[in-house]
Image (cartoon, rainbow, N blue to C red):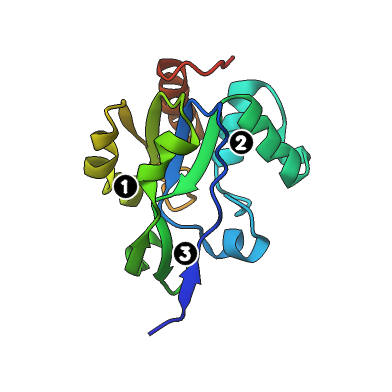
Amino acid sequence: MSELLQGLPPVIARGTKLVVLGSFPGVASLEAGQYYAHPRNHFWPILSALWGLDLRALPYARRLQELRERGLGVWDVYAACRREGSLDSAIQAPEFNDLASLKRRAPGLRGVAHNGGESARAMAHTRQFGLPVWRLPSTSPANASWSFERKHAAWRAVFLEAGLDVL
């Protein structure tokens, strides 16, 4: 069996209005120590289009600052797991993050959005927070059935519903 992999720390501020939960970082993200580090992942390009700011051109720490300032948090459903490669379907023995701490970490939280199907498996848990919960199309390059434009439109609708400013 593969080694136990540890995820990334949450990017959540007291002013976070919406938190996007992925499943677990892929290999590129774990190696870089950065959320959504795979160059073909649509996460940063979608946010760039929503905010009119080229986030990929910024250093990672500045990207995270932009998220916090705009009320967006990022975390994963799983804190640790065993997995070969980056596919969610290969996740074994997952250990959950303390998702119940979200409301304490972000007292003004208005909703939770799950980035993709594996993350959405935790929707029954996040719905217990009494907040709106959405399933977003995965930004992963493995989600080739959704075009960038279609993903962008879905993400924009959720951001607007959660009260985040977008173009």
The outermost residue toward the bottom is 1
Sequence-earlier tag: 1 or 3:
3
Side (left or right) of 24 relative to 165: left
Residue 124: image quadrant is top left
The amino acid type, in three-letter code, at marker 3 is Ser
Sequence-earlier tag: 2 or 3:
2
- Using the numbered discs, state the Cα–Cα distance from disc 2 to disc 3 in whole angstroms: 20 Å
The residue wearing badge 1 is: 117
Disc 3 crowd, CA 10 A, few/some/many (<14, 14-19, 20+): some
Residue 71: image quadrant is top right
The amino acid type, in three-letter code, at marker 2 is Pro
Please tell me which residue is depicted at 32% across the width and 52% down the height of the picture: 118
Disc ID at residue 45 = 2
SS at badge 2: helix
Side (left or right) of 142 relative to 49: left
In x, y percent, where is residue 7?
A: 51, 61
SS at badge 3: loop
In x, y percent, where is residue 6?
A: 50, 67
On screen, residue 129 above or below 119: above
The outermost residue toward the front is 104
Please tell me which residue is depicted at 61% across the width and 24% down the height of the picture: 70
Sequence-earlier tag: 1 or 2:
2
143, 159: nearer the viewer: 159
On screen, residue 105 above or below 84: above
43, 76: nearer the viewer: 76
